[in-house]
Image: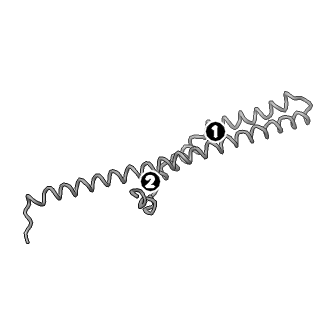
Amino acid sequence: MSHEPEQDGPAMRKAITGYFHDRVELMRLELAEKAARLSADLAVGAILAMLGFFVLLFISLMAAYFISQLSGSLFTGFAIVASSYLLLLVVLLIWGKKWIGPRVSDTVVKIFFEESDPENLSDVGK
């Protein structure tokens, strides 16, 4: 039973084309999954940051009023709290790229290069 090259050519071409189409589709699905996961992580991070901001705001106001009562001057209490935030800002400007930048980059790279769960992809075409 010999196969003639003329008859196998179109079938082989169709199989190869189908394979590449499936690979491209798989890559698209994996990219969509990773983008969705990154978006969800960003949304959760933004919500946590907003809640943290309000907690920090009210704690700062409490501290400023407490220091004001101890010092007897409203200006002094708020100036001390504002100075501590100014000091924190300077520290973050100096060393922030070294501390925060790599963590953010590592998280994004980890999400994009993490292996996909094959069980999640098996239900895609159904």
Residue at point 61%, 45% (across, down): 45
| Left or right: where 28 falls relative to 61 | left
Q: CA distance from mark 2 to mark 1?
A: 29 Å
Q: Nearer the viewer, residue 101 or 42?
A: 42
| Left or right: where 95 falls relative to 37 | right
Q: Quadrant of the N terminus?
A: bottom left
The quarter holding residue 82 reads top right
Mark 1: secondary structure:
helix
Disc 2 crowd, CA 10 A, few/some/many (<14, 14-19, 20+): few
The quarter holding residue 53 reads top right
In the displayed structure, 44 sits above or below 88; it is below
Q: Nearer the viewer, residue 39 or 68?
A: 39
x and y, in percent, of residue 90 in the image: 66, 35
Q: Quadrant of the C terminus?
A: bottom left
The quarter holding residue 76 reads top right
Q: Residue furthest bottom?
A: 1
Give, as a three-letter code, the residue at label 2: Phe
Q: Which residue is mark 1?
A: 92
x and y, in percent, of residue 56 in the image: 74, 40
Residue at point 8%, 58% (across, down): 6
Disc number lying in front (2 or 1):
2
In the displayed structure, 81 sits above or below 13; it is above
Residue at point 83%, 35% (across, down): 64
Please give the label number shown on residue 113. Answer: 2
Mark 2: secondary structure:
helix
Disc 1 crowd, CA 10 A, few/some/many (<14, 14-19, 20+): some
| Left or right: where 77 falls relative to 111 | right
Q: Nearer the viewer, residue 88 or 50?
A: 50
Does label 2 or label 1 sit earlier along the sequence?
A: 1
Residue at point 22%, 56% (across, down): 16
